[in-house]
């Protein structure tokens, strides 16, 4: 069983950054030139205004991390910086995800979406922005996620990506319509976290 937590303990932020740095270096998303030579970690300008999430397996090993970049006065989201998208208040951007290779084809990623929904409920977020590849967008739409494309593709993060948004109220409406056909999937998102 995978357990999810908000990175709140003294060691959690460093754990998040170590895991993300290792996965990003391994997959070529960053190079050693992108890593801080003093700390050995990859950190960007969004980390200071982000909620960091971690996933741990049954053995207590951290197997994934994700962040929610918070909007607000003086804070920008990657969709604004890369696509000139104006974001609504009470929103965040799903970003900075890294899942160790052995867990990429598991349900760890889906669990992060459930964790972000729980944090959104706690913090009053209604809009979740993201920058995604076409294949990811196609899969999200195929399973019924109400995801809106906000602009055309641009080459960012080493590939063509598009800016998207998922609004919480629209997601909840979709979950309500598929509750009978997919009860376990819906329960996963609606049960207390």
Image: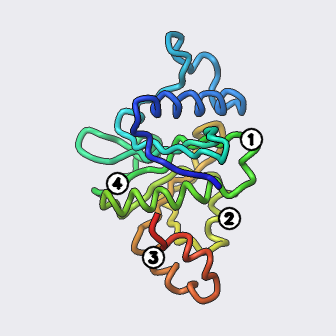
Instruction: Tell which circle, 1 or 4, labels the residue nearer the N-terminal end.
Output: 4
Tag count in the figure?
4
Residue bearing the label numbered 4: 87
Location of residue 167 in the rendering, given as x and y in whole percent from the top left corner: 42, 67
Q: Check if mark 3's residue and mark 1's residue have beta carbons within 8 Å.
A: no
Q: What is the spatial separation of the Cα atoms under label 1 and label 4, in whole angstroms?
A: 32 Å
- Quadrant of the image containing the N terminus: bottom right
Residue 98 at what x, y percent from top left?
Answer: 61, 41
Please name the residue that numbered disc 1 is placed on. 101
The residue located at (60%, 49%) in the rendering is 161
Give the number of the mark in front: 2 or 4: 2
Q: Earlier in the sequence, mark 3 or mark 2?
A: 2
- Mark 4 to mark 3 CA distance (whole Å): 20 Å
Q: Please state if 104 lies on the left or on the right of 157 as rendered.
A: right
Disc 3 to disc 1, C-alpha distance: 31 Å
Residue 7: x percent and y percent?
44, 40
**Mark 3 or mark 1: whose residue is earlier in sequence:** 1
Question: Which label number is shown at residue 16?
Answer: none
Could you say where residue 81 lies in the image, as x and y percent from the top left? 42, 40
> Which mark lies nearer to you, 4 or 3?
3
User: Dot 1 lies on which element?
Assistant: helix
For the residues labelled 3 and 2, say whether their Cβ atoms are less than 8 Å apart. no
The image shows residue 137, relative to residue 156, as above or below, that is below
**Numbered disc 2: secondary structure:** helix
State the residue position of label 2.
Answer: 139
State the residue in front, 23 or 129: 23
Q: Sequence order check: which comes first, mark 1 or mark 2?
A: 1
Kindly indicate the quadrant of the structure image that contains residue 128: bottom left
Can you tell which of label 1 and label 4 is closer to the viewer?
Answer: 1
Identify the residue position indicated by label 3 in the image: 172
């Amino acid at each position: 069983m995978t357990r999810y937590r908000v990175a709140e303990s003294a060691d959690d932020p460093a754990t998040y950054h170590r895991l993300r740095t290792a996965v990003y270096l391994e997959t070529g998303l960053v190079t050693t030139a992108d890593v801080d030579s003093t700390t050995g970690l990859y950190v960007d300008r969004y980390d200071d205004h982000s909620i960091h999430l971690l996933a741990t397996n049954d053995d207590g090993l951290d197997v994934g991390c994700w962040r929610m970049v918070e909007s607000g006065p003086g804070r920008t989201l990657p969709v604004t910086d890369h696509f000139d998208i104006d974001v609504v208040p009470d929103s965040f951007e799903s970003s900075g995800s890294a899942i160790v290779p052995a867990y990429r084809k598991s349900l760890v990623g889906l669990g992060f979406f459930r964790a972000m929904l729980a944090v959104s409920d706690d913090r009053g977020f209604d809009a979740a922005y993201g920058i995604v590849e076409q294949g990811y967008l196609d899969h999200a739409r195929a399973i019924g996620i109400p995801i809106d494309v906000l602009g055309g593709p641009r080459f960012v993060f080493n590939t063509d990506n598009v800016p998207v948004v998922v609004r919480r109220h629209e997601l909840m409406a979709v979950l309500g319509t598929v509750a009978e056909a997919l009860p376990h999937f819906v329960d996963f998102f609606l049960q207390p976290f």
